[in-house]
Amino acid sequence: MSRWLVACLSFLLSAALPSVAWAAAYATGGSSPYRNTVLWLTWGGGSQLGTHGVTLNNGDSSSISMPVASGISLNVSCTLANIAGGGLLQSYRPGDFSGDSLDDLYNVGGTGGSNQLIAGISRNLGNSTFEINCVSTLGGAPYRLRGVVMADAESINNSGEFVEASARGTWNVVEMRKNVGAGPYDVTKSSSGSNSVIRFGPGNDNNTAAVTFLNFDNAAHAPGNLAVNMAFSMRGGGTTAIAIGLLVPYADFGDAPLSYGDAMHVVDDLQFRPDGVAVNNTATNINTAIYTPGGLAPPQTDFLGSMGPDTEQKSSYSADAKGDDNFPAGNPNEENAWLAGYRLTVMQAGTQIIQPVVCVGSGSVAGWIDFNRSGAFDPGERSSVAACSGGVATLSWTVPAQVSAGTSYVRLRYATDAAQIQQPAGVADDGEVEDHLITITAPALKVVKSNNAAAGIWNYGQTGTQYTLTVSNTSDVPTGNPPNIPAGVITVRDQLPTGIVANWTGTHSSGSWSCTAGGQNVTCTSSQVLTASGTAGDSSSFSLPVTVTAAATGLLRNHASVGGGYDPFNGGNTPAPGEGCNDANHCTRSDVTVPATRVSYAKRANTAGPVAVGATVSYTLDAIVADGNSRGVLTLTDTLGTGLDFANVTSAGVFTCNAANPLLCTLPAGTAPGTYSVTYSASVNAQASGQLVNTVVGTGPDNPTCSANCSTTTPVALPRISVSKASATAGPVAVGDSVAYTVSVVVADARTTAVTTLTDTLGSGLDFGSVSNAGGFSCVPGNPLVCTLPAGSAPNTYLFSYTGIVNAQASGQVRNTVVPSGPDNPSCAGSCDTTTPLASPLVSYAKQASSGGPVRVGDSLGYTLSVTIARSRSTGVVTLTDTLGSGLDFSSVTSAGIFTCNAANPLVCTLPAGTAPGTYSLSYTAMVNAQASGSVRNAVLGTGPDTPSCTINCDTTTPVATPGVSYAKSVNSSGPVSVGDSLTYTLTTVVSNSRTNDVVTLTDTLGNGLDFGAVTSTGAFTCAAGTPLVCTLPAGTTPGSYSLSYTAVVNAQATGQVTNAVLGTGGDNPSCTINCDTTTPVAGSQIDYRKDAAATAAVKVGDSIAYSLTAVVSRSRTTAVFTLTDTMGPGLDFASVTATTGFSCNAANPLVCTLPAATAPGTYTVNYIATVNAQARDSVSNAVLGSGPGTRVCTTNCTTTTPVLAATVTYRKSSSTASPVNMGEAVDYSVEVVVANSQTTDVLTLTDTLGAGLDLQSVTQPGAFSCNASNPLVCTLPAGTAPGTYALSYRAQVNAQAVGSVRNAVLGSGGDTPSCSGTCSTEHTLAEPRVVLEKLSGPASGTEVRPGDRLRYTLRATVERASLRRPLQLVDTPDAGLSVDALPTDCVQQGTDIVCTLPTGTPVGQHEFVYQAIVNQEARTQVFNRLRGRYPDGSPPPECGTCETQHKVISDFALRITKTASPRLVKVGDLVRYQLAVENVGSSNWRDGVVVDTPPAGFSYVDGSMRVADDDGAFALASSQTPLRIGAVDIAVGRTATISYLLRVGAGVRAGTFINQAVATADDGSPLSNVATAEVRMDADPLLDDSLVFGTVFDDHDGDGWQDSAELTGVRVQGGFAPSAYVPGSTTLDRGDGPQPLADASAPLLHGVQVGVVHGLGSTSDNVENHQVVIRQRLRELAFTDDFVLESAQGHRLQLDAQGASSMQLGGEAAKGLSAAEPSVHREIARIAEGYEVAYVIGNQGIQEQGIPGVRLATVEGLLIETDPFGRYHLADVHGGDARLGRNFIVKLDPATVPAGSELTTENPLLRRVTQGVPTRFSFGVRLPPSPQAAAERAELTLGEVLFAPGSSVLRANYRPVLAEMAKVVDRYQGGDVVIAANGESQALAFARAVAVRDALQAEVAEAARARLTVQLRTNVLDPHSLVAGVDAGGALLGNVLFETDKAVIDEAFKPLLAAIAARLEQMGGGQVSLVGHTDVRGSHAYNQALGLRRANAVFEALRVQLSPAVQQRLRVRSEETAATRAAARLQEARR
C-alpha cells in the first residue's frame, strides 16, 4: 500500500473524530545541545510522547504541566487550528524515513524506528496550512513564552517540498544536520506584515535537517493571557513533516540534590548568534562546509559569574552540583561565580566568613551554605543580601556552632528584585541560580602501629617487647582550637592477640596518652591538639609494653583503631578494632611472629684422634635453644661405647649431670635462647681397638632434634716408635778421648707388635768402647753396634748408652749414625747422626816485667815471654813479636830457651811446628831512655796457624816518676765593692822535682756577680780569656815559680759578696797551697723613681692617656720588695697595663706595682693607660708613691695633671623616606646630636620647623630628648649630658598644600654653641601620578565565541599617587571582526580606534569605560582587542597590565593541526619529541579519525612512546611505522587533541634539515586538515662526520716500520727436572720484592708456573737485572731433564736442556717481527744441606721501541703538530671527505727535528685515506743512531797492611778516618770492592782482616750501599782473577786459586782459610759462599758448569764438617759463573 493511499484512508477515518489533547515532551537523546531547552509538542496520544500516524484535527492540543519549584507548576497548552489545504495532518515519528535527520538531534529511546518522540505533523502530497495557539501559566498566572521552534521532521526533497513558519519575532537557524555533497538545502527568510517568515526547502532528501528558533516580540503576546499564535505551512511531493516546539520555560534552575528545593530564574534576555541568513526572500544553501548556524547566546547582563546562564527545563539534581554544568556536553562552565575548590573547616564555628561573588548587573545576590549538612538550607544558613556593584557582591555568613564535616552545598541567587531571593527556593523573574559543591573539612585521624620485633619476630621470654602507636592528623584542620573550640578527645582502641598481655597494671601513661587494659582490650585516650598535617605537632606517639607468654605462638595479629578528635569518621566514635575494621587510616594492625621454641643438640669430640690407650678423650655436648625460652626440661643421654671409661664432667655449665655411664645431663625449663655446653672426659681403656664410638640422645617437651653430629667416632692409634741419638760429649775432643753416646727409643700410643732393631755404625776416627747401659735392649758389642727391643714393649722411653774412643785416624770431626728398623716402622724423630768436632791445638802466651816502677831514665828493665801448648802438638810455627814502645831501647836476649830470636826491636822469636804440649820461655832486657814520660810500654803478639792467644800481661806498662806542681791565688781589694768596680787577681804556680810531664792547666771560675775583665800579665802561661779563665803552663817546664794577673768587674748580679776560685789540673797532679778561693763583700742597693705622662695637649672624654713609671736600682741587687702605688684622680678610669719591665701590677685604681727582691741594678719601667671618663672636666691628675728598703724620696715628676677639652655639640638631620613622595604619605625624619670632648654645660635646644605641605604626626622615638609634639617641633637635651650620640625620630604627613616638594629644617641653640655638622634641612619631591591600564572582557579573554556573540569590554585606568596633571587618552583598537555598540560617555570613534579621555585632575582611584561589541561575519579564527594609553602632550605612556584580549572564533574550518619538534638541533642517537595539536574547528564531533604523520628519512619511531590526549584517551597505531597512522582519534567540536611521540635519529642521518609532515585524513585518505610540518636541523658530528688522525713517532730499533713492544706477557715456565728429585715446599718466586713461596701440592714447576709479565729494557742503558724474575727450588739430586720450556703470549718458546743450553722457537707476533721482546733463562745451582738449590733466572733483553718527543709534523693544510713526551700526537675534527669514499690525507715528518744520524724506516710523507667517523693512524718509524754507553762504574779501593799491627786483624784506631773516607767513596758508587793483598801472611789472618774491614765499613756506609760492598783478598791487587777469598753481604767469596786447573780438590794450603770462613759462617748463623771466577775457559759451558758444581761440593763438604748442624742447614755454596765467563765458554764451543 502506497504512502498516498494510507494518507487518504486516514483522512476519511478522521473526518468524524473529535479533538484530542496530548502531552508535550523534552528529548532525552540526540546530539543537540538544546535537548533540555526545546519542549516539543507531541501528537497522536497513547502516551506522553504521542503515537505515530494518528490523524490530527482542529482543536487537538499538546500540553504539559510540570513543577518548577515547591508548589509552583508551569502549564503550557498548544492547540491546532485553521487546518487547511485539503490533506490530512497526521502525527509523525521523526526517523520513520531513512533520510530523516531530526531524530539524530532529538529523540526519546533512540533514532529511526526506536524514536518514541512523536513530534512531527505530516501530510502526504500537496500543501497544508494550520495554526497553533499556545497559552502558558506559571503558578496560575499568565506566563510569557519566550520563543517557538520549528524543524523539518521528515527529509525534504528537491522537488518543491518545504516547511514554513510565520510568527511575530526574529527567526534564527540554530542547528543544521549537514550532508555536504548530498545537494543544497535552502533556507529563506522573509516578512509578511508584522510576522517573520522562515522556510526550509527545497532540500536533498538525504539526511539533512535544520532547526530554527524564534524570539517572540513583545507584541506577539496577547494582552491578558499572553497567548501566542504561529502559522505553519508545508508542501510535499510525498510525505512532508514539520516539528514544532516551544522555548519553555527558558529558565535557569539549580542543580543541587532534590532535598535542597527548586530555584528557578527566568531568562528574560533571549540572545542569538547570527545565522548568516538574510531576511531578503532569497534562498540560502546552508548544506555547505563553510556555513555556520547561529544559536542561542548567553545573556549579556543580570547574571552570576563571568558568563550568562544557559537554560534548562527543570532542576538538574546532581550529587556534584554539576547537573547544569555538564549539559550540554562541551558547554563552557558558565557557573563560575563561586570560588572553585572552596572549603570550610569545623574549626571556623562561631566565626564570620566573607566571600566575594562575581556578578554582572546591578541586582542583588544572596547565598546559602548547608553548614550542618542536613540536606536543606536552614534559615540560619543564609548570608547577607548584597548588592552587585563593580562586578562583585560581597556575601558574609556567621558560621553556626554546629558545623558538620564532609561535602556540602552552597546556593547563590541573583535577581534584580531582592525580594524574590529571600528564600533558597522559588521563582525569580530574572537573574541566575548557581549551586556548588563545597567541602567542610575536619581533622582526619590516622593510626599506625609498629612493634620492636627484630625481623618481625618476638620470642617467648623476650624482655622489652612493646608496640608503638602513632596517631597523626592527615588533614590541615587541627583537632581543637582553644579557647574557641576545646581539644577533641582522641581514643585509640587496641586488641592484643592471644598470648600477648599488657605489661602494666592500673593506668599506663606514655606521652600525652593514658591507657587501661581489660583482658586483651586496651583503651588509650589523649587530649593533645594535633596540629595541621605537615606542621610540628601533627602527630602523637605512645608505646604499649607487653609480655610474650608461653601461650604465644605463630603469627599474632594486633589490631588498633582511632576515633574522636572532631574526626567525623564513624560518627566521631572509635570503631571496634579487628578484621572488620578496614578503613586505611582509622584502622591498623601490627603483625609479629612468635615462633615455637627450637631446641637442638649436637656432640663433638675435642680430641681428634687417633688416641692411645690411657689417653683422655674430651667430649662436648651442645644444646641450642632458639626462638624463645625453652618450655620444658631437656635431657641429654650420652652412652659411652666399648673402650671408654667415664672420667669426669669437666664443665657442666647450666646442666645438671649424673657423672656416670650413660651420662645424663638436664637443662631446666625456661632456659633463655643460647648455646649451652657440657664438657666431660673419658679414658681410653685396654679394650680400645680400631675406633671409639659414643652417642648422645636428647629428649623433652620441646622435641629436641639433633642438629649435626650426635655420634662421635675417634680412631685408636697404632704404636709409634721414634728414635733419637745424642752424645754426652759435646767436643771438641782429642785423640784418646772417650765419647759417650745415648740412643733413645720412645714407644707411644700402643705396645709394639714386633722386635725393633737399632744398628749404630761408628764412623772413621772412632773405635768401639763398651756398652755402659743396655736398659731394656739386647746388644751385640762391636762396630756396628746392634741392639734390639722386644715385641710387646709398652709405651715408654727406652735408652741404651755406649762409648767410643777417638783414635789416630780422627780428623776434623768424628761421626756415627744409628738406623732403626722393624715392622712397626720406627723412625728417626730427632738427630740420629751425631758429629763431634776434634779439638785443635790450643796455644797461649804471656809476658812479665822485672820491675813495677816507677823508673827513671837510664834504668834497665827485664822481660820474660812464655808460650803454653795444650790438647795436641802445634800444627804450625808459633811466632812471638814483642814491640818496645817509646821510652825503651832493646838491650839483649838473656835466655832464648828453644825459641829462635832476631835480637832487635821488634823482637821476633819463633817456636817450631810440632812442638809438644808444654810451657816454653825466653828472657830479654831493655833500657829507659830520655823519651820516657809517664810510663814506658811494650807488647807481645803471638801468631800462627794454631791461633795463639794471650793469657796474661802481653802488654806491659811501667810508670815513670812524676814532678811536683803547686799553685796559689791573691786579690788586690778587701771590699766592699759596688757594681762596676774592678778587682785584680794574681795566680802563682810552683814546679819542683823535675820537668813537668804534662801541661799544667789553671782554671779560674768567676762567681756570680763578676764579669771577666782582662789578663794583665801572662808570664810563662798561655791564657784563653773568658769565663772561666783557662791558662796553661807547657809540659817540660823546669822547676820554678810562675805567675799571671787578670782583672774582673763587679756586675749587676752581685749581692752580699762576690767569690771566685782557681783549680789546677794536669798529668802532674798540681795542688793548691793557699788562697785558691777568694771572697769580697758587696755594698747595699739604692732605688730612685719618677713618673711621666705621654699626653702633652688637652684631652677629651674617651681619650686614653699613657703613663710611664720608672725605677732605677743602683749599687747592687735589692734585698726586699719595692712598691710603686699610683692613684688616679676623678675623671680617670684605669684601662690596662701595656708593658712592664721587672714589675708585677694589679691592674686596678690605685695601680700597685712591685719589683721583687734580688732585682739587679738597672732601670725598670711600668707603662699603663688610663681613660678619660664622663666625669672629666677642666683637668685630670694622678700621683705615684714608692716604698721599700733603699727607696729614695721622689723629688721630680711624681704627680701629673692633664687639661680636658671643653664640650662640643654638633647636629644633623636626615630622612629615611626616599623621594618622590605621594600625597597623604608619611615621611620619617631623624635628628642626630653628637656631644664630644666632655659633658655639656648647658641645655641644648633643637627647633625643627616643618615647611608648607607637611603636618606633624608624632614623635616616634624621642630618645633622651624632651619634645613638644607641635610645629615647630622643639626638643631639648639637658645640661650635663655625657659625650655620645643622641637621636630622635618623628613622622610628618604630606598634606594637600604640598606642591612640587616639601621641605623642613632644624636649628640648634644653647650655651655649648651647637653647630650643624652636615645636612640640617631636607626636601622631598612629590611623586608623579602613576596610571595602570587594564582591559577586561566578558566573556573572559581566551573564551571561544561564535559570530553573533556579544562581548562586553571594560577599559580600566587606575590612578595612583596623585591626580592627573594632564589629560589621558585610552585608545582601544577593536578587531575588524567586531561590531561596536554605542560608546560610553567621553569616548569617541577615531577611525578604527575608540578613544576615551580622562581629563586633567582625575582623582586617585579606578575609572572605567564599558562598551559592547558583537562578533560579526568578518571575524576570522580569533578576534583581538588591544588597549594602549597616551598623553596628548607626548609624555611617556602609562603602564599597561592586561591590555589585550583574545577570543577564539568557532569557524567552519574542519580540523586544524599544529606541530612542534623538540629539540630543534639534533645529533645521531637523539630522541626528538614531536607534538601535534589537532583542533576541531568544525561544527561536529570528529570520531575514529586518522592522523597520518610521515617521519623524515632515517628517523625511526620509538616503540611505546606514542601518547594521545583526546576525548577518551584511546588510540590505535598501525603496525606500519612509515608513515605513522594514528587512528581512533576522537575530538569534540571546539576541542583539541594532543599527540606526542618520540623519533630516534638514525646512524645514517647526516647533516641537514629534516621535515616531518602530518595531516588528518578521511577514510578514503583525502585530507581533512592542513598539512602541518615541523623541522629539525642536524649539524655535522665530529665523531661521525669528521675523522681523527693520530699516531706515534717511535725509535724503530729493528727497522721494520712497526712500533714493537718489548713486554713479555703471559709468561709461563714448566718442567726441567725429575719429579723424584724435588724437595717439597721449596719453590719460591721472586719478582724483585723478595722470594714469595708458591702453593706446593707437588712440584709447581712440573705443573707450570704463571710468571705473568717480564718487562723489557726501557733503553740501551737499562739493566736486565732490574726486571728479572727468579724461580728457586731445592732438589735432592741434580736430575735435570730436557723438557724445561718458557712460553709467552707473544709466541716465544724457549727450551732449556739438561745441560742448561737454550734454544728458541718463534710463533705468533714474535715470528711476524711484531715483538721486540728477547726472553732469556739461565740456571744457577748452589750446594745446600738438603742437596741443591736451583734458580731459574728469567730475563728480557728486548728494548722497548719508545716514542720520540718533540718531533714536528705538518699537513698539506699547513697544520703543525709536535709529539708529546711519549712521542704521540693527534689531530681532531679532520674533514672526512665524502661519506662513501673518504679522502686522501698527508702528514709529513720534519727530519730536522730528529737527532742527527737518524734513519726513517717508514715513508715520509705518509698518505692515508681518511673516512668519516673512522680514526686513522699515521705513525713514523725512526731508527735513532746508537748512543755511546758509559761502562758501569764500580769503586775499587786498595787497602794496605798498614791498617793492622803485624800478625793482627785488629784495625788500628788512628786509621779509622781512612775508613770513613773509604765509606764516602762506597756510598757515592752505591757499593764497591775493597781489595787487600793476600801475599804476606796466612790466608786465615787475611780473611780475618777482610772481615774486620767489612764489618767496620758496614757501620760507616749508607744502608743502600751495604749489599753491594765486598772486601776481597787477592794475590795481585790489580787482577780480579787472583781472588783468594772475600766477604760480601751474603757471607764469603772464594776464588778459583783454591783449586788446580781442571781439579775439584781443595789445596791443603787453604784449609786454614776454610776454617776461618767456617768460623765466620758460624758467627753469622749461616750464609752463602760463592766461588767466583772462571773454571776453565778451554772447556765447554757444560763442562765448566759441571766442574764448578764439583768444586762447590768440595767446598761445601769441607765447610760442613766444621759447622754446627743448625748452621749446616743454612749453608749455600754456589759457583758464580760471570756473564763474561759464560760468553767465553759459548764462543769456545762455537769454535769447535
Image (cartoon, helix red, strand yellow):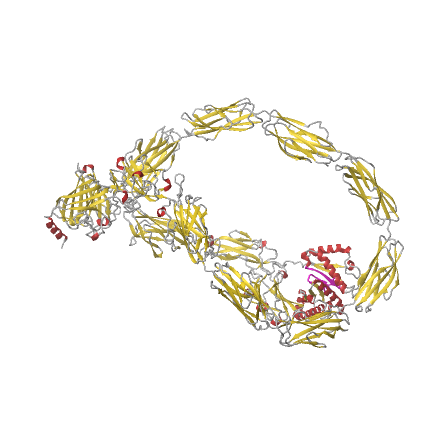
Residue 1925 seen from this side:
yes
Specify whether residue 1926 is painted magenta. Answer: yes
1001 relative to 661 in the view: left or right = right
**How many callouts does the rendering have?**
0
Report which quarter residue 1641 is drawn in.
bottom right
Residue 269 x %, y %? 25, 38
If the image is split into quadrants, where does the N terminus sit? Answer: bottom left
Residue 735 x %, y %? 77, 71
Residue 823 x %, y %? 62, 76
Q: Height in image: 1006 above or below 1509? A: above
Q: Height in image: 670 above or below 1422? A: below
Q: Nearer the viewer, residue 984 or 1878?
A: 984
Residue 60 x %, y %? 14, 45
Residue range (magenta): 1907-1930
If the image is split into quadrants, where does the C terminus sit? Answer: bottom right
925 relative to 207 in the view: left or right = right
Report which quarter residue 1152 is drawn in.
top right
Specify whether residue 1921 is painted magenta. Answer: yes
1717 relative to 1504 in the view: left or right = right
Report which quarter residue 343 is drawn in.
top left
Q: Nearer the viewer, residue 172 or 1660?
A: 172
131 relative to 482 in the view: left or right = left
Residue 1942 seen from this side:
no
Q: Nearer the viewer, residue 1559 or 1295?
A: 1295
